[in-house]
Image (cartoon, rainbow, N blue to C red):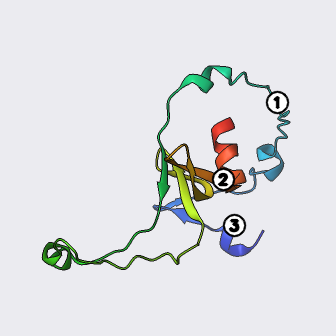
Amino acid sequence: MSDALDNASFDGEELNFDDFHLEDLETETVVEAAPKVERDLSFFRNIPVTVTLEVASKEIALGDLMKAGEGSVIELDKLNGEPLDVKVNGSLLGHAEVVVVNDKYGLRLIDVLDSALTAVGQ
């Protein structure tokens, strides 16, 4: 050991490093991976969720919004024909386009994010 460590002191007390062995601190711990448990998620199939098709958004000053009146136009951030965001309980699920089914609006899923499906399965 170096002289600095041999003569080290703490609050005036001399410390002796001669009896200190690093091997004493080394222990091997073997942790086996838990077997993957398949979960029965059928219970969750009947839980209601809110599906939202978000057309677009725009951040504007509150004062500008207060000036808006009937007939005012607020330009949004999505282009015409661009896929719209589909959200489930506020979290992005994927993207879709608007369709009409029996005189009602519907949505056709264009893509579903893998991360959204993974989150549901955990």
Residue 46 rendering spot, x and y as whole percentages: 57, 23
In the image, what residue occupies the spot 81% across and 46% down? 26
Residue type at the position of mark 1: Lys
In the picture, the quarter occupied by the C terminus is: top right
Image coordinates of residue 35 in percent, x first then y, are 84, 28
* 54 with respect to 35 (left or right): left
Give amino acid for label 3.
Asp
Q: Foreground mark, 2 or 1?
A: 2
Residue at label 3? 6
Locate residue 41: give its quadrant: top right
| Gap in angstroms between the C-alphas marked 2 and 1 | 31 Å
Please, what secondary structure does the residue beneath circle 2 have? strand
Q: CA distance from mark 1 to mark 3?
A: 51 Å
Circle 3 sits in a helix, a strand or a loop, which is it? helix
Instruction: Give the residue number, with chain letter if any, for mark 1.
Output: 36
10 Å crowding of disc 1: few (<14), some (14-19), many (20+): few
The residue nearer to you, when weighing 76 against 71, is 71
Q: Quadrant of residue 17?
A: bottom right
Res. 47 visible in picture: yes
